[in-house]
Image: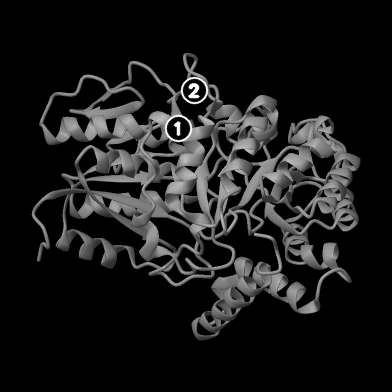
């Protein structure tokens, strides 16, 4: 029975959800994705009704889709996907086409952008969005709702009467402040721990990245448009205005190029400091930084401290200089630079979170131990450790195909992104990579963190890897306890 006969747009988001129930698969406010949130805001402000549904690996796809379509009059479904989620997204889109062939399925996101030719071959997708989708999506909806003939829409590849309509151009939205603020409230019912100590609202500061890391999508994304800038900065006043509008005491500043533009960095930190001056409860900030020798000075950290940026995330990726520079194509920094960065941050009581990749192609166990050794020396407050996955469209993926290490991306599984070793290499077997992943925290933090914390973190790695083999009644108990323990442990961090 339809609750409403008004036509609506269904927005579908998918994710891995090991530690959360299927009805609330998003853990924290921090996990709300900005990309599709901006697109939903554009749709809402254009006057169209929309519905959001979040699928995890625990959902019964057919049952949930049947219920959704029995209660709503959808005519367009929007998907976003990274490579590891693509096959899961495709499965959902295929079933929608099976039961409702008249529905228009639109897909965007990094995977669709970098692999649009392959995605266009799928019968379940009618439109592929390449690049920014805020304006293009609204334009397409308007054409469909007003029954207008479509000749071409920028950033969209559209299937029409057996043909593919190509976009006149592919572009990036250069004026980020022209976009409506992302739709946040629509996510509330999907979040397991909205009041968690670890929750923070994301605020977009920039889009794009100057680095050309071989494993990351940024270098490939930067090439899709030759007419517009890829790295774009927002107006500082607009950033502060949005921070105040969300009215929350913890903010995650989304910016991959914060320290590469000194004037912007100075203007932003000054504005954040000023905005906090008359507040009874100061806003705490999380930001990401690069480990460049040029910023290893007290002025940089003093500005960070005065702006109340209490956590800095930095990408070490590998402790092996050879792997960083020759395989990952990371910027030029040394392990000594990382150590000095951590020491100076501690001096100003700023927490450091590092990002690490293991199971990197051409990596040896000795390279892996170099990562362990520098982290044992630095003792960052927390480490986000992931197993490398070759993402289609990136330079390192192409290198692995050329070297005949992989044949394609059919090895992706939506429930195992960057937590399960899926590729064996000459110097490192899948089993070795998996063991390195599970016992990573013990090797880095042994005798530096409490045993209960090490046990919880290690148990978390194990659950991520082998949740399929744990009986459901035991797994449900373990995931609940693990989530509670992780949340309590996070209270020991600054953010």
The quadrant in which the N terminus is found is bottom left
356 sits to left or right of 61: right
Which of the two labelled residues, at mark 1 and mark 2, occupies the earlier sequence position?
Answer: 1
Image coordinates of residue 89 in percent, x first then y, are: 39, 50
289 to 8, vertically: above or below:
above
398 sits to left or right of 154: right
Foreground residue among 163 and 23: 23
Instruction: Determine crowd level at label 2: few under 14, some 14-19, many 20+ residues with C-alpha closer than 10 A.
Output: some
Pointer 1 residue: 113
Residue drawn at x 52%, y 60% is 415
404 sits to left or right of 89: right
Foreground residue among 355 and 163: 355
87 sits to left or right of 377: left
Is residue 314 visible in the rendered structure shown here?
no
Q: How many numbered discs, if any? A: 2
Foreground residue among 268 and 63: 268
Which quarter of the picture shows residue 291?
Answer: top right
Q: Are marks 1 and 2 in contact (CB under 8 Å)?
A: yes
235 to 122, vertically: above or below:
above
Is residue 451 visible in the rendered structure shown here?
yes
Q: What separation in Å lies between label 1 and label 2 (alpha carbons)?
A: 8 Å
Which quarter of the picture shows residue 182?
Answer: top left
Element class at badge 2: loop
Image coordinates of residue 342 in percent, x first then y, are: 83, 49
Element class at badge 1: helix
Pointer 2 residue: 224
Image coordinates of residue 364 in percent, x first then y, are: 84, 48
Image coordinates of residue 282 in percent, x first then y, are: 60, 55
């Amino acid at each position: 029975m339809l609750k409403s006969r008004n036509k609506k747009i269904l927005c579908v988001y998918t994710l891995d959800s090991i530690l959360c129930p299927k009805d609330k698969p998003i853990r924290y406010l921090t996990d709300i994705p900005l990309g599709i949130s901006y697109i939903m805001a554009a749709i809402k402000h254009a006057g169209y009704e929309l519905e959001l549904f979040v699928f995890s690996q625990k959902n019964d796809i057919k049952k949930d889709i049947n219920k959704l379509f029995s209660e709503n009059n959808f005519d367009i479904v929007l998907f976003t996907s990274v490579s590891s989620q693509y096959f899961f997204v495709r499965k959902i889109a295929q079933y929608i086409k099976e039961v409702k062939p008249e529905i228009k399925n639109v897909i965007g996101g990094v995977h669709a952008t970098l692999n649009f030719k392959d995605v266009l071959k799928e019968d379940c997708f009618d439109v592929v969005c390449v690049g920014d989708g805020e304006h293009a999506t609204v334009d397409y909806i308007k054409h469909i709702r007003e029954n207008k003939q479509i000749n071409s829409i920028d950033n969209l590849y559209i299937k029409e009467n057996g043909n593919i309509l190509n976009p006149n151009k592919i572009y990036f939205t250069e004026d980020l402040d022209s976009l409506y603020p992302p739709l946040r409230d629509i996510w509330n019912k999907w979040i397991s721990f909205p009041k968690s100590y670890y929750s923070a609202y994301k605020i977009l500061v920039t889009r794009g990245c100057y680095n050309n890391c071989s494993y990351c999508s940024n270098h490939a994304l930067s090439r899709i448009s030759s007419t517009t800038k890829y790295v774009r900065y927002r107006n500082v006043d607009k950033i502060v205005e949005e921070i105040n509008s969300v009215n929350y005491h913890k903010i995650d500043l989304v910016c991959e190029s914060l320290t590469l533009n000194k004037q912007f960095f100075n203007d932003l930190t000054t504005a954040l400091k000023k905005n906090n001056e008359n507040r009874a409860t100061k806003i705490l900030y999380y930001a990401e930084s690069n480990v460049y020798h040029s910023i290893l000075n007290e002025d940089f950290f003093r500005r960070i401290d005065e702006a109340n940026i209490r956590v800095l995330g930095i990408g070490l990726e590998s402790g092996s200089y050879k792997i960083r520079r020759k395989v990952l194509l990371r910027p030029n920094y040394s392990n000594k630079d990382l150590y000095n960065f951590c020491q100076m941050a501690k001096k100003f009581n700023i927490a450091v979170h590092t990002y690490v990749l293991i199971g990197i192609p051409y990596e040896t166990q000795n390279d892996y131990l170099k990562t362990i050794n520098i982290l044992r020396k630095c003792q960052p407050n927390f480490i986000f450790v992931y197993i490398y996955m070759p993402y289609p469209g990136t330079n390192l993926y192409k290198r692995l195909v050329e070297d005949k290490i992989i044949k394609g991306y059919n090895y992706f599984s939506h429930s195992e992104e960057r937590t399960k070793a899926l590729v064996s290499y000459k110097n490192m077997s899948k089993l070795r990579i998996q063991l390195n992943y599970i016992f990573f925290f013990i090797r880095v933090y042994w005798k530096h963190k409490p045993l209960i914390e090490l046990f919880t973190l290690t148990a978390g790695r194990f659950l991520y890897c082998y949740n399929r083999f744990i009986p459901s009644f035991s797994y449900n108990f373990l995931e609940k306890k693990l989530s509670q323990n992780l949340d309590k442990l996070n209270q020991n961090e600054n953010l």
